[in-house]
Amino acid sequence: RGIGRDPEQLRKISRLTGLNIIAGCGYYTQDTHPADMDKKTVDEIKDEMVSEIKNGIPWTGVRAGVIGELGTSDIIYPNEKKVLTAGAKAHAETGTGIIVHIYPWAPNGLEAIDILTSGGADVKKININHVDVEIDIEYIKKVGDTGAFFEFDNFGKEYFIDSRYRGFSGGVFARDIERVKALKELIDSGYLSNILITCDVCLKTLLHAYGGWGYDHILTYILPMMKDEGITDNQIDIIIKENPKRFLNIDRSWTNIT
């Protein structure tokens, strides 16, 4: 919520292309929260998420299949902690995976995991985003050691954002080859089952129409680069098929979701 969801367009795109598209629920970073967020309780926020998972996003009939991307800022503010706790409780009730936006230049993933697990979340259903902007291998390993997923999701972004002109963020982004080399190191260190990859297409400039790499960047360019760095076909299949299945799967045996 708060950053312009359009579930009906997701449904339209899914039907036109035949792609499985999964809608999210919850709240992003504090600066996008509604004016009444201070008054909302954890249980009220949890109930919103659970309703969107079980019954559908209001006025659309589209049900959310994942919790998030729940947002955190350069520090995790009280209302962001409230949303994380609500997300943990919604997960405990529905079995749905949780995606967490971590501010790329203030890696708070471990703190977010602590908040979520304290709220009742299964760490194996937590996905910590944006670990590949400024790559800190030891931090990433610590996230993996908890049992959570970590996500390399900035493929195609190889630039510098000056915070004087963007305000909300600023810093250097790693290059794609650095991301791939880091993946190889993490695989060799035993973290294959923790890895998720994607390209966070969040700006017009990332689309083909505006000169960007587009949504097909990973399939077209990154997978061959991974093979060139010694990542095997089997390891790639685990990263792009098996790991997403484990994260997104909902165990309906203990929920009332049909």
Image (spheres, helix red, strand yellow):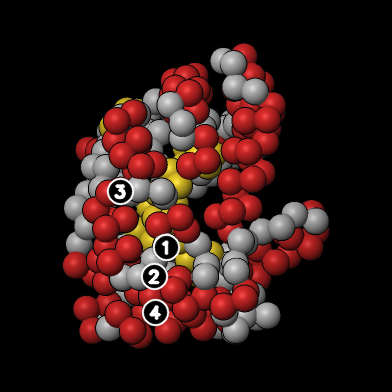
Between the C-alphas of marks 4 and 2, the distance is 6 Å
Disc 3 crowd, CA 10 A, few/some/many (<14, 14-19, 20+): many
Between the C-alphas of marks 2 and 1, the distance is 11 Å
Q: In front here: 83 or 247?
A: 247
Pick whichever of labels 2 and 3 is earlier in the sequence: 2
Indicate left or right for 33 with 191 as reference: left
Mark 1 or 3: in front is 1
Indicate left or right for 210 with 134 as reference: right
Between the C-alphas of marks 4 and 1, the distance is 16 Å
Q: What's under tag 4, amino acid-wise?
A: Lys
Mark 2 or 1: in front is 1
Q: Are marks 3 and 4 in contact (CB under 8 Å)?
A: no
Give the residue at mark 2.
87
Pick whichever of labels 3 and 4 is earlier in the sequence: 4
Pick whichever of labels 2 and 1 is earlier in the sequence: 2
Res 98 visible: yes
Checking the image for residue 46, the label placed there is 4
- Badge 3 marks a residue whose secondary structure is helix
Q: Position of residue 205 (x, y in %)?
A: 52, 37
Give the residue at mark 1.
122
Q: Are marks 4 and 2 in contact (CB under 8 Å)?
A: yes
Q: Are marks 2 and 3 in contact (CB under 8 Å)?
A: no
Q: Position of residue 252 (x, y in %)?
A: 62, 74
